[in-house]
Amino acid sequence: MSVLARSVGNAFRNKVRTAAVVAVLAVAIGLALAMLVANQAVGAKVQELNASVGTVLTVNPAGGQGFEGGGEPLTAEQAATAAAVPNVSAVVGTQSLRLRNATEAAAQAAAGTAGGPGGGQGGPGGQSSATLTTSLTAAVDAGTLGGRNQAANGTTGTAGTTPPARSLPITATGIGAEVDTTGKALAITEGTGLGDYTAESTSALLGTTLAEKNSLTVGSTFTINDQAYTVAGLFDAGTAFGNNAVYVTLPTAQTLAGLPGELSSMIVTVDSLENVASTKTALEGALGPDNADVTQGQNLETALGSLGSVKNISLIAFIAALGTAGLIILLIMVMLVRERRREIGVLKAIGAPNRTIGLQFVLEALVLAALGSAAGAAIASFASGGIASALISTNSTSTTAAPTTGRGAAMAGAAGGAGLPGGGAGFPGGQGGPFGGAAQLVTSVTASASPGVIAAGIGAVFGVAIIGALVPALLTARIRPIEVLRGE
């Protein structure tokens, strides 16, 4: 009988034990493969972010940060100046607005309450003194944070009266190209874009949750300040807050705000990652530090930091699970060598070399590893996506858990969730809280168990299986046939 045939037969000599060992190995190997897939997916996401928004700079009014700060608004002339800076490949202007549900605004006016953030007291960064009303209802409930924000801004009504129920305002962003407020291409899931983003239009893009809340589809209409707008398409920003938003063309938003030629922020795209630092310096010089603040991907830095942590965690977990699989194989092979002392002694007595006997145990370990890897690959194919999402969600939650205090923090948490370019919600980055708009950059990580990654993982498993089997295989050299046979 050949060594291979004997090894395969030995692997199934005790079927119950083999099944138990394979089951344990399958769990360890499945976890290892799932972590490897998550690691590769995060690495691919980092490369994608660097390629898509890693070259993006955000320009905000100097001293302005959402509802706080001061300074002068940006202008179309400054956008032209930025576009002329070397290595700048594109400049996209934005205008941010807040929309209040018309029915709610009327009820609040009748009750003598204020309009809330972005209502009658001015939009983000002082964008407009007019109340912008809409037929839309926000897709995000006000909840506890909305109530706190209302109280912090004196919108609880007059003494002795109960204020009407309120919802959060809706973010409306006028933008000069088909990108979101991070500079990343809009993920349109249904319908089309707005066509010419440099011309006024009565078409709009709605977030998926906002459209669902208002029972709107592509082709449906809604109103802003009694003007009808048609839903041209739906987009998915990756978060519930990000999807509680409307995009219109830049001139449309400027007209609604009554501020022609003014910009809330500018999204500047640099031609390469290598030129980002020098272009940032050049932009600061061209626009003037007293006129504009130029930031380099605050959202991106936070997202990359979060993804880097997830990548490190997944790599450590992969190594730990792989080591566990190797330890399991080591222990089972040591036990088998001890059980088969008589068999090994007989083989050596009839002339079998140590190399042949050791190879038999290595092949037996590889059979067990192959069975465990097959089951583990199946586990990884189903579990890798959930594990990657859980790792990212946990890390994102811990990142956002940093304490925020004060009026700006209250506004960001309650009314700033929908996000505004360059920190329109009270923090740079727009989504509110330290993690900010980076949330929509990392929630779209897709982990798929590709054949290449699985093959690499199984190769690593076979490597540790060989190492784990070599140690007990070498123990066979210490077995002396005469002692074994004499004991019998």
Image (tube, rainbow, N blue to C red):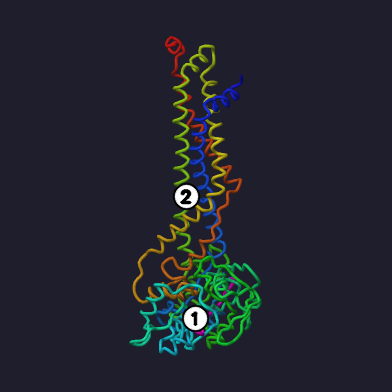
Indicate which disc, 1 or 2, sits on the residue closer to the N terminus: 1
Determine if the magenta segment contains residue 296.
no
Give percent across and percent down for residue 407.
Answer: 36, 77
The numbered mark at residue 314 is 2
Q: What residue sits right under mark 1 in the picture?
A: 98
Under tag 1, what secondary structure? strand
Left or right of residue 199, residue 278 in this image:
left
Closer to the camera, 337 or 354? 337
Q: Is residue 243 above or below residue 80?
A: above
Closer to the camera, 189 or 42? 189
Which image quadrant for residue 364?
A: top right
Q: Quadrant of the C terminus?
A: top left
Which image quadrant for residue 49?
A: bottom right
The range drawn in magenta is 89-103
Type of amino acid at the residue the image marks with label 2? Ser
* Prevalent SS, magenta region: strand
